[in-house]
Image (cartoon, coloured by chain):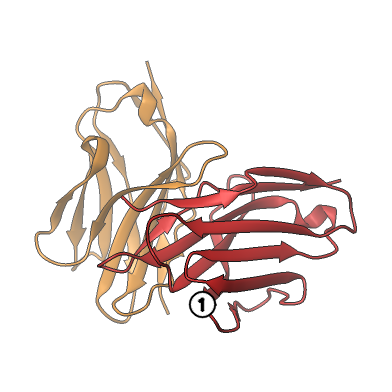
Chain colours: A orange, B red
Amino acid sequence: AQSVAQPEDQVNVAEGNPLTVKCTYSVSGNPYLFWYVQYPNRGLQFLLKYITGDNLVKGSYGFEAEFNKSQTSFHLKKPSALVSDSALYFCAVREEGDYKLSFGAGTTVTVRA
Amino acid sequence: GAVVSQHPSRVICKSGTSVKIECRSLDFQATTMFWYRQFPKQSLMLMATSNEGSKATYEQGVEKDKFLINHASLTLSTLTVTSAHPEDSSFYICSARGGGAGELFFGEGSRLTVL
């Protein structure tokens, strides 16, 4: 069985400050990890993924995430947040060879001007 | 990147009617499509896995006679909500597996409101 936990329902930061959205996962095999962003009444936009290789993954819109196997974490980060980054963020995991994604509960990010 | 189109984006219907939502992969062939349901401010819940040319696989607790899924071609899957009731009101999102790496691409979602 696979699962994802996003421990924070909401994250509030000031524009220009660093942004971190936390994610931990549980899988029995090798994890494939993803971050998506969702704006109101829209589908999911892909931000980045970790399959293998470097633990630090760089993605769209200046976001990056670090895979930490020992802590089973895949936190999303952005060095300097923008007001336009305000949205709902989902972490997701699947196991190698299985395309069924399991999503976290989502974290609402609010960046204030 | 690959594009997945959902139609309609919004639909309002009367209780007891059936509603069909289409999910199309526009520039790739999708052997597998997934249908999700999302309640307000909640996560996506997988409803079913749709494979081209075969019956859909439904997740536990999802009524297959209520939510009919058809994957007749490599670019189209449809979700039909039969005899819709207000509790079926939700945001439905599809994703399609395709491309060289077989990654998943998501549609824009369809908001169903049943009066």
Left or right, A76 with respect to A68, comes to right
Q: Residues within 10 Å of mark 1 (few under 14, many from 20)?
A: some
Left or right, B32 with respect to A81, comes to right
Farthest residue in the bottom direction?
Answer: B54
Is A68 rendered above or below residue B115? Answer: below
- Judged from the image, the secondary structure of the residue bearing numbered disc 1 is loop
Farthest residue in the top direction?
Answer: A113
Chain holding disc 1: B
Left or right, B63 with respect to B103, comes to right
Q: Where residue B2 sits in the image (x, y, percent)?
A: 35, 53
Residue B20 visible within the image: yes
Residue A109 visible within the image: no
Q: Who is closer to the viewer here, A88 or B2? A: B2
Q: Residue at x 81, y 60 (%)?
A: B18
Left or right, A88 with respect to B87, comes to left
Q: Quadrant of residue B60?
A: bottom right
Q: Who is closer to the viewer here, B47 or A65? A: B47
Q: Quadrant of residue B20?
A: bottom right
Is A106 rendered above or below residue B98? Answer: above
The amino acid type found where label 1 is placed reads Glu
Q: Who is closer to the viewer here, A41 or A30? A: A41
Q: Which residue is mark 1?
A: B52
Q: Residue at x 27, y 46 (%)?
A: A76
Q: Where residue B76 sits in the image (x, y, percent)?
A: 54, 64
Q: Where residue A80 sits in the image (x, y, percent)?
A: 22, 27
